[in-house]
Amino acid sequence: MSRTFRYIQNDDVLKSFIKFKDTILIERPLVIARHGDYSLTMTRVSDNSLRLTILNSEKKKKVFSRTYDVDKTTDALVSRGTRHACQKMAELSDEEVNRKRLQIWKWYVLDWQEENIDSDGEILKAELMWDEYVDRTKNDVLDIEAFLHGDYLNLGNTLMLIEKYMKDPLLQEMFRKFAIEDIMEMTSEDTKDKSIADNEAKNQTEETKKHTYRFTVSVEATDKEHARQALLYYLAGDERIKVQK
């Protein structure tokens, strides 16, 4: 699933409108947050009125809007409205991602069925029967978890599958773009988690190799404080300080 990227926090939306209503907002809307193909923007309707709008940037379509009268609202009300709009935006984005993933999954199932057409009767019979001691190591039928973490993440296979079953050039390009971005996002999370784990393991290993060393030197000085200052200057590279090692 995509993440929501925020540019203006909920509690700062009304303040931002008041601050920018006579400058930036006269020229263009301000983006409050993004999630996938969706963005939440703030628009200046008038000197005392702002509008929150959810836009689908891919389809160039407005899907939600709400207007606030600055003189009749509060920071809390606008903040709550912004939070709800961000939640709605995330739900819409995730719903579209799941629909497209499911469509590709159907193509995987169809492709699998074509390869196993001679075994359809046996597979159907096996699925209709209940076996208390079924061998759960078998993967005769695809499930969504195995799909998301197995074949689907193989970008080459997925792109070939899209080309095989989606003949419409425009839709084919849409699914190709979606699959590339979705798989890259999913695998980047795995890579990030692995990188964090590797760094932690490396740090722990390096910590076990650390040792403490103590050196004894003699410094000529009139008192203890004078000797401490002389030693500090020597450690800082002052060649005028002479010590006996």
Image: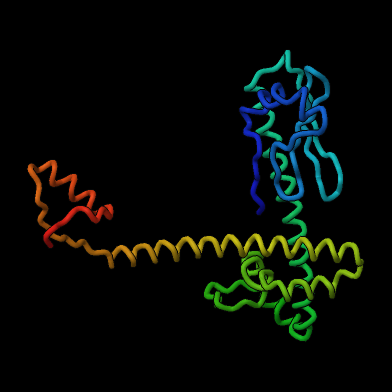
Which residue in the rendered view is the most extreme toward the left? 222
The quarter of the image holding the N terminus is: bottom right
Where is 72 relative to 217, above or below?
above
The image quadrant of residue 90 is top right
* In this rendering, position of residue 80 left or right of residue 107: left
The quarter of the image holding the C terminus is: bottom left
231 or 23: which is nearer to us?
231
* In this rendering, position of residue 13 left or right of residue 176: left
The image quadrant of residue 60 is top right
* In this rendering, position of residue 203 left or right of residue 27: left
The percent coordinates of residue 190 (x first, y second) are 56, 63
Which residue in the rendered view is the most extreme toward the top? 71
195 or 21: which is nearer to us?
21
**Which residue is at a point 91% across and 67% down the rendered structure image?**
169
**Residue 141 visible to an observer of this rendering:** yes
**Which residue is at a point 70% across and 36% down the rendered structure image?**
32
Which residue in the rendered view is the most extreme toward the front? 240
Where is 92 relative to 15, above or below?
below
The percent coordinates of residue 80 (x first, y second) are 65, 28
Where is 150 relative to 6, above or below?
below
The percent coordinates of residue 45 (x first, y second) are 83, 24
66 or 134: which is nearer to us?
66
Where is 89 relative to 27, above or below?
below
**Which residue is at a point 28% across and 67% down the rendered structure image?**
209
Q: How many marks?
A: 0
**Residue 128 visible to an observer of this rendering:** no
The percent coordinates of residue 58 (x first, y second) are 83, 50
